[in-house]
Amino acid sequence: MKRREFFMLSVGGVLIYTLNRQAMWLDAAETPLHVELKFFKADEARIVAAACERIFPSDENGPGAKEAGVIIYIDRQLAGPYGRDELRYTKGPFIETDPTFGGYQGRESPQAIYRAGIQQLGSDFTGLEPQQQDEKLRHIEKTLFFQMLRSHTVEGMFCDPLHGGNANLVGWQMIGYPGPVMSWRGAITVYNKGEAYRPAPQGLEQILGTRIQGLENG
Amino acid sequence: MIQMPRADVVIVGAGWTGLVMAKEIATRTPLSVVVLERGGPIRTTAQYAAGMDELDFEIRLRMKQNIAEQPYTHRRSSNEPARPVRQWGAYQQGIGVGGEGEAWSGVSPRFLPEQFELATHLRRKYGARLPEGLAVQDWGLTYNEIEPYYWRAEQMLGLSGRAGNLRGTRVPGGNIFEGPRSHEYPLPPHPYPYFAALFEKGARDLGFNPFPLPAATPSGVYTNPDGVTRPPCQYCGHCGYYGCMVGAKGTPGTTMLPLLRGRKNVTIRTHSWVRRVIHRDGKAEGVTYMDAAGKETMQPADVVVLASWSMNNVSRLLLSGIGEPYDPQTGMGTLGRNFATEVGGRTEVFFDKPLNAFIGGGALGNGIGDYMGDPPDAQVSAGVFRGGLVRTLLGGQSPIRAFGRLPPGTVSSNWGSEWKKAGLQWYDRQLALNSNATHFTYRQNYLSLDPTYTDKWGDPVVRVTMDWTDHEVRQSRMLGDVQVSIAKAMGAKAYSFKGNERPYDAARANDTHVSGGAIMGASPESSVVNPWLQHWKMPNLWVVGGSAFPQNESNPTLTLIALTFRAADALVDRYLKHPGALA
């Protein structure tokens, strides 16, 4: 039987969605939360989480990949149909002679691309200084792995929390996105003069009062 | 092979054209109609509400056909091998009952009158100055002939808008460059968010004539002539890519299915993937398809209607050996010719004020028609022979896709602290202007079967041979210049235009409005179907949809619904009484 792998999310005062999709509040004083991983091994998750944190850092301008739980988002995506490459045409032959044309034409799935990318970052990545981590990432900036990692980090920051990222709606709070509210019919003729309208964000499950199954669970 | 009981009519595809056809035949005749749809059943409004999720619907594209099962291939010219588009870029197509019609945005302009006689018009006006290799054709019908069907489609959809040309009288505030319409729009236009109000003022200051986009989302409660009532648009910002969670948007599900439910003479059979039209001695005998269990099944019928996505209509004909495949070297053969998409270009516009851009509706916004049709003389001298619409389109800004759109040169990296800071600063201070212009058809752009790549059943997929010519690049730049001039007049702090550049790459493009391949026309030498969308060589086969357009002008849905109504009239009122060729 496969050993169960966990990720220790050491974040404070935020709402985290655990693997079984229960919301848990964490106070700064509490012990870190152990989240069961679906795809990564724990040491892989630490490397990817460290890289995501450089892409979207937690800094004086607000929370980043760490607080949003981006690593949990990516772990679930990679474990699901997207990571298994079930949303891409994967029949050959594979013609990869001109990478500037035709999009990604390779054989490797997102799962395989991550595994190879993590190797490239190296097991010592988490121990590096932020500046050294940046250098390392800058070095692989043009690779498909990095481009995926960057996209997935943005997705994990700003997706609906039902997917495991944007925990406690930290991403939406930062940009003032109110979530998938069912009607702005009252607002459209009022907030139309260049003034900010910033209702408190809500996730889809909150708005509908039901559980939503994301594609990653399929 | 499983044999199904004979039907009077079998319709391939349960999207807009398939269900319009089904509704017209089933409600006006006692004939039995079987509709075959490869996706699942229609989704409920509750399911659509549970789908207001950017990640799964705008990025993972849950309303679209899974491209893993059936891609297409693309090459820029006949001289290179085609490669499969492995992840959706251009030509995303819907799946399930309602098809792409459930997830469209509802932008519903009419084509200009001269579009229907474009070859004649261009020849007369520009003659030998036209680009080389042009394959533009007349449609075999005129604007006056399609006008009543436009009006029927507009009433069915409950379009919100403002007429700009009522029976020949130009009406300021509407699109004064459009063709004459017999009636005002069924509903008044939608209100303008801030960005559209800025566009309105900026365009007016420049002497342009802005008008509200015609929208298939009702601005108020609407009951159409079929007695179907829909609530107004809620401006929830989840329209294109999504189903409508209140049933406001005009879709096959909200307008056609209510009229088909409970009818004993209509069966919609889902998870049924049609592969071939079976025919003998110039007569279609039915279709074969893979059923939900993956078993090959024969559905015999007296009349076959191909009503799937335009590219799939063409590939079904090619796979079935109906008609002569087009050969770009000789110009012989009609099947596959005149493939087109749309010419565009987009200007991101940045402001120092928040736009509340999460408020939106699929076709919410406004545009100018001043550059539609024949371009200004100076542009003609520069080699541009057809223009397009310049517009705002305020469908609702979604955070994943919108975060990180920055004024050019703001930061040097697209990740890290500086980038994040800039992203936060400019989020909700950015929206776009875009364009939608006639894409000319050319001899070298066409559809055929790919010799190498196959779909999930092992059938060859469709191969697109297509590149922009210098004409499209010039068209796009002309419209980009207009976009930029309006952006400045709107008070933009920064702007950034991206247009159509060669080479064209379907994997990285996002145009959805494909057309051609089984085009309509006045003669069987130069078209696949006659002006009633009946196959020239097989009178009991009808091929409806965007595949019939000899070239594309802009958002095609209204026009393809209008053409389908006209085809249905011909089928019901003429063909069924005297089966045989109508032309």
Image (tube, coloured by chain):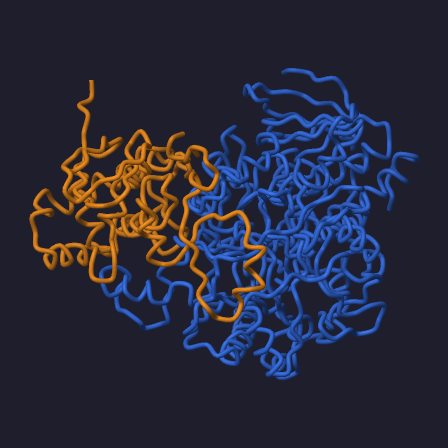
Chain colours: A orange, B blue
Tell me if residue B244 can be seen.
Answer: yes
- Give the image location of residue B350, x and y in percent: 43, 71
Res A210 → quadrant: top left
Position of residue B205 relative to residue B472, above or below, is below
Horizontal arrangement in the rendering, residue A4 relative to residue B167 (left or right)? left
Q: Is residue B388 left or right of residue A144?
A: right
In the picture as drawn, the residue positioned furthest to the right comes out as B577
Residue drawn at point x = 65 percent, y = 61 percent:
B190
Q: Is residue B227 above or below residue B363?
A: above
Name the residue: 33% across, 57% down.
A174
Numbered circles on residues, count: 0
Task: Describe residue B304's horizontal placement relative to residue B292 as left or right.
Answer: right
Asked whether residue B514 appears in the rendered view, the answer is no
Image coordinates for residue B112, horizontal then vertical, percent: 73, 65
The spot of residue B398 in percent (x, y) is 44, 54
Q: Where's residue A140, x and y in %? A: 20, 54
In this view, the residue in front, B577 or A121, is: A121
Relative to A89, does residue B374 appear above or below in the rendering? Answer: below
In the rendered image, the quadrant that contains the N terminus of chain B is: top right
Note whether B79 is above or below B568 in the view shown: below
Q: Nearer the viewer, residue A33 or B288?
A: A33
Residue that appears at 78% across and 47% down: B224
Please name whichever residue, B180 or B79, is drawn nearer the observer in this view of the structure: B180
Q: Which residue sits furthest top?
A: B2
Residue nearest the viewer, comparing B516 with A86: A86
